[in-house]
Image (cartoon, coloured by chain):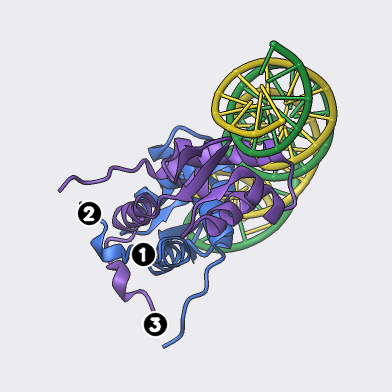
Chain colours: A purple, B blue, C green, D yellow
Amino acid sequence: MKLIVVNTVDFAKALADETRQKIMQLCCCQQLSVNEIVEALDVAQPTVSHHLKILKNADLVSAERRGKQVLYTLNQKHLAAGCCQVAENFAPEYPIEEVRE
Amino acid sequence: MKLIVVNTVDFAKALADETRQKIMQLCCCQQLSVNEIVEALDVAQPTVSHHLKILKNADLVSAERRGKQVLYTLNQKHLAAGCCQVAENFAPEYPIEEVRE
DNA sequence: TTATTATATAGATAATTATCGATTTGTCAA
DNA sequence: TTGACAAATCGATAATTATCTATATAATAA
């Protein structure tokens, strides 16, 4: 039982881009190659690689080489940990399971 | 019972700055004037006002004028809602109350 | 080996944003 | 009123970052 420690500034910066959130959405519950992501979006391949690097540095995706391809998938656990950390730091009075009103 | 809807890109962008997170930390459970925030940080007053505006546009702080001063306080509920929204969008397999490991 | 495909990196540029000093606006007291 | 203080806005600059083209690296097949 180890606590995942998240730097909330780095976490938020990694999330703070529309293209990255689209990428995250795409590989949320599946492994996708870089090219599949490129085809799903409207940006050049190096741009996608750039964003994947940022997401990987923030531990928000993990990569696995499969032959010529590299498959990326969202690291949901780390993402959830980041959300929790932000909520704990900045919303101590609102346990996150009670936000809906 | 109304659901708070959060644009997760705007939410993340508002969080994605160290100075803003310091401001959020400062006025997390209390009302602070702009000057009090300026004194607690190492940035100029217009810079603080700039960040407060961004936080306010993202609904992360609310402001209340009190004589000459304007008191800011963190909107914890909206912050928690943003965290939930991000977690729901990107970590459906990890209910956020079960993240610790 | 060489050719082909997939991805990453390098370098340049454009866009965004953080910061500051100067000024304006708002509030109140004398 | 006027003066003083608090905060917001303006305009300029610096720093960061997103994007692209061109090229390099990696893996595989012929």
Residue at the disc numbered 1: B93
Give the image quarter of residue D14: top right
Three-letter amino acid code of the residue under disc 1: Glu
Marks 1, 2: nearer the viewer: 1
Disc 2 secondary structure class: loop
User: Is residue A28 depicted above or below D25 in this figure?
Assistant: below
D19 or B56, which lies in front? D19
What is the x, y in percent for residue D17?
62, 37
Label 3 and label 1: CA atoms lie apart by: 23 Å
Q: Which residue is drawn at 39% across and 82% down?
A: A101
Outermost residue, bottom side: B1
- Asked whether A2 or B47 is in front, the reply is A2
Q: In this view, does C28 lie to the left or right of A59?
A: right
Q: Residue furthest left?
A: A1
Residue bearing mark 2: B100
Q: Position of residue C13 (x, y in %)?
A: 84, 28
| Marks 3 & 1, CB-CB < 8 Å contact | no
Indicate the secondary structure of the residue bearing disc 3.
Answer: loop
Of marks 1 and 2, which one's residue comes earlier in the chain? 1
